[in-house]
Image (tube, rainbow, N blue to C red):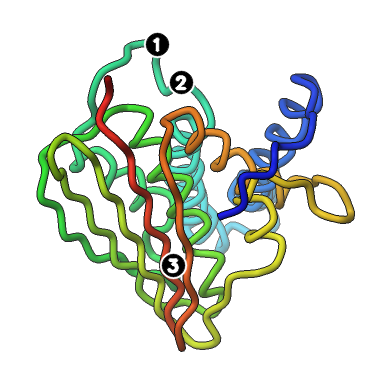
């Protein structure tokens, strides 16, 4: 990957764009909650109340799942450092994408992972999902080799792709049209990768988009 220095991005600009991305991800389930509450408030349609309650339960669950996922992916996820179990990461990913058109398989050869590396994994999952917009399977592999962590994500689905925007931002560069709530996420991923002194490689082959992240041992 290119080692071009990343463009200057002010802290306020970064925070604004990340907030835009969070709001975008939460808009649909929160809007559904509002719609369901309006239906419950309508005394002229009592037959719709059961459906509204079901929608509230579903939307509340989706909102909670997305918030927990984004809390760790984009934020501290709690102030404590240390390691995170893969069972917890699986729960977060299921909360974000469960019931949708993307399925996940896991091949894990380690029980847990450094917190920063876990955040990299969650962000890499977000990118892998965009590589198969029509749905498909994301195969996640994690292993330790002599203290190094290797994360591999293979997204397989119809018309798999790695967009020019993803290539640019994962390379630490600004898109031609500037950043927005969509492009800031892979750029943020590249920031986390640099923080971990890691290397990220991507490859598109047929209907599979692959992302491999090599994280060296801490010195």
Which numbered disc, 2 or 3, marks the residue that appears first in the sequence? 2
* Cα–Cα gap, marks 2 and 3: 26 Å
Q: Nearer the viewer, mark 2 or mark 3?
A: 2
The residue lying toward the viewer, choosing from 173 and 12, is: 173
| Residue at point 43%, 39% (across, down) | 69
Q: Eyeballing the image, is 209 above or below 181? A: below
- Location of mark 1 (residue): 79
The residue lying toward the viewer, choosing from 39 and 149, is: 149
The residue lying toward the viewer, choosing from 87 and 46, is: 87
Which numbered disc, 3 or 1, marks the residue that appears first in the sequence? 1
- Location of mark 2 (residue): 76
Q: Position of residue 133 (x, y in %)?
A: 56, 74
Query: Which quadrant, please, contains the N terminus?
Result: bottom right
User: How busy is the neighbourhood of tag 1: few (under 14 within 10 Å), some, or many (20 plus)?
Assistant: few
Horizontal placement of 194 versus 119: left or right? right
- Location of mark 3 (residue): 100
The residue lying toward the viewer, choosing from 203 and 35, is: 203
Asked if one can make out residue 36 in the rendered structure from this viewpoint, the answer is no
Is disc 1 placed on a helix, strand or loop? Answer: loop
Q: Hey, which residue is sitting farthest right in the picture? A: 177
Q: Eyeballing the image, is 5 above or below 206? A: above
């Amino acid at each position: 990957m290119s080692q071009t220095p990343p463009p200057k991005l002010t802290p306020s600009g970064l925070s604004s764009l990340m907030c835009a991305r969070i709001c975008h991800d939460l808009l649909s389930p929160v809007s559904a909650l509002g719609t369901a509450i309006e239906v419950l408030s309508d005394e002229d349609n009592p037959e719709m109340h059961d459906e509204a309650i079901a929608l509230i339960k579903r939307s509340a669950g989706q909102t909670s799942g997305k918030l927990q996922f984004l809390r760790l992916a984009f934020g501290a996820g709690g102030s404590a450092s240390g390691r995170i179990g893969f069972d917890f990461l699986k729960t977060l990913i299921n909360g974000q994408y469960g019931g949708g058109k993307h399925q996940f398989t896991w091949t894990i050869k380690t029980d847990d992972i450094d917190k920063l590396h876990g955040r990299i994994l969650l962000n890499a999952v977000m990118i892998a999902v965009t590589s198969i917009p029509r749905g498909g399977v994301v195969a996640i592999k994690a292993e330790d080799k002599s203290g190094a962590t290797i994360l591999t994500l293979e997204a397989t689905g119809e018309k798999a792709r790695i967009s020019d925007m993803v290539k640019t931002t994962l390379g630490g560069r600004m898109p031609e049209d500037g950043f927005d709530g969509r492009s800031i996420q892979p750029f943020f991923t590249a920031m986390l990768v640099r923080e971990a002194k890691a290397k990220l490689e991507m490859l598109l082959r047929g209907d599979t988009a692959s992302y491999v992240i090599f994280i060296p041992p801490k010195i």
